[in-house]
Amino acid sequence: MSGEPHVAQSGEDRLIARYFRPLARHAGAFALMDDAAVIAPPAGCDVVLKADGIIAGVHFFPDDPPDLVGKKALRVNLSDLAAKAARPLGFLLTLALPDEIGDAWLAPFARGLGEDAELFDCPLFGGDTDRTPGPVTISVAMFGAVPHGRMLRRAGAQAGDRVVVTGTIGDASLGLALRRNASLAGKWGLEAEQGNTLQARYLVPQPRTNVAEIFGHYASAGMDISDGLTGDLAKLCRASGVGAEVHATRVPLSQAAGSVLARDPTLIEAVLTGGDDYEILATVPAGKVEPLRTEAAGNGVAVTEIGTVRAGHSVRVLDQHGNALAFARPSFSHF
């Protein structure tokens, strides 16, 4: 025994040490033992900053598996970085936890978060933990790196560019509908595997980090699709001062989503406006679409051309007859 007084550790300190210190692999995180962290950006790169949060009852269900909640919190931010042509460097985490949240929730949450931090090479650098009388609230502030001056902005689209998307659109919005009402699976004629596929797209997004650099080489503008394809395309076009026409029949669908639309074509609105796709939406000069598509396919990501950038300010989605579709709500909005 040294005889020196023991410095008591607070409950918050124990929580951080037990669940989150193992995620702080970078030396600049100081094992989460300091008030701040440091990071040196790679030579010749700009630092890209992004913050996004998810709230129980808004972005995920309170009884969703905690490990998948952890993954989603990280991945929605990784998706934004990918659409900016940036690679992740690390993140800060802020947790607001109600009294009923304890080890049984925190242990799998931290495990899922840690698995993805390792998978995407995106270590934790710090953050904050608080109690709240409200629902679980998880906020991630992420930083990434992109070659100097090469961040892919919303502004930059030019008339004549082609509109492209990665992956498939609409799965998450249909999956959310199924999560809220399981009886829809029977109405839509879905097999169990199809329903599981749609719900998985809502639970755990797939950020397209492995094609971020490729889009940086070819695209003129870009963003990720979080609030719905039509609404996010409108945001991109406003920033670029252009309009666009998209053909609904060209929008890529999964086998499950295609089966649903075959049963109920009116669900095209949910597919195009529902959000939570977390795919990349970009505009690409016409001559660069094919090389972009080829390189992305080599990385296992499909890229589909769905429309054209036009002069003007209108964004139209055309049906199979060339008529413009009208939607009651063009995109998801919190307000």
Image (cartoon, rainbow, N blue to C red):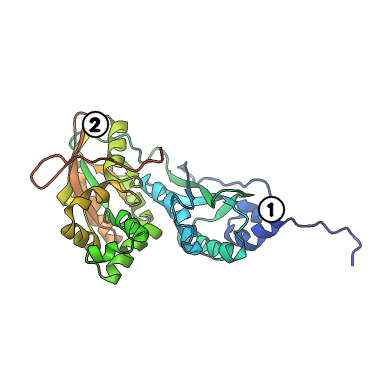
Question: Does residue 19 appear left or right of residue 182 in this picture?
Answer: right
Q: Find disc 2 in the rendering and name its residue.
A: 242
Above or below, 323 against 77 in this view is above
Determine the residue located farthest toward the right in the rendered image. 3
Q: Going by the picture, which residue comes out furthest to the bottom?
A: 192
Residue under pointer 1: 33
Direction from residue 164 to residue 213 in the image, left or right:
right
First reached walking from the N terminus: tag 1 or tag 2: 1
Quadrant placement of the N terminus? bottom right
- Write the residue at 38% across / 44% down: 84
Between residue 186 and residue 265, name the one nearer to us.
Answer: 186
Q: Is residue 314 visible?
A: yes
Q: Is residue 325 above or below residue 111?
A: above
Q: Can I make out residue 218 in this image?
A: no
What whole-number distance in Å separates the C-alpha atoms at marks 1 and 2? 49 Å
Q: Amino acid at mark 2?
A: Val
Element class at badge 2: loop
Instruction: Give the residue at x 38% y 49%.
Output: 82
Nearest the viewer among 24 and 235 is: 235
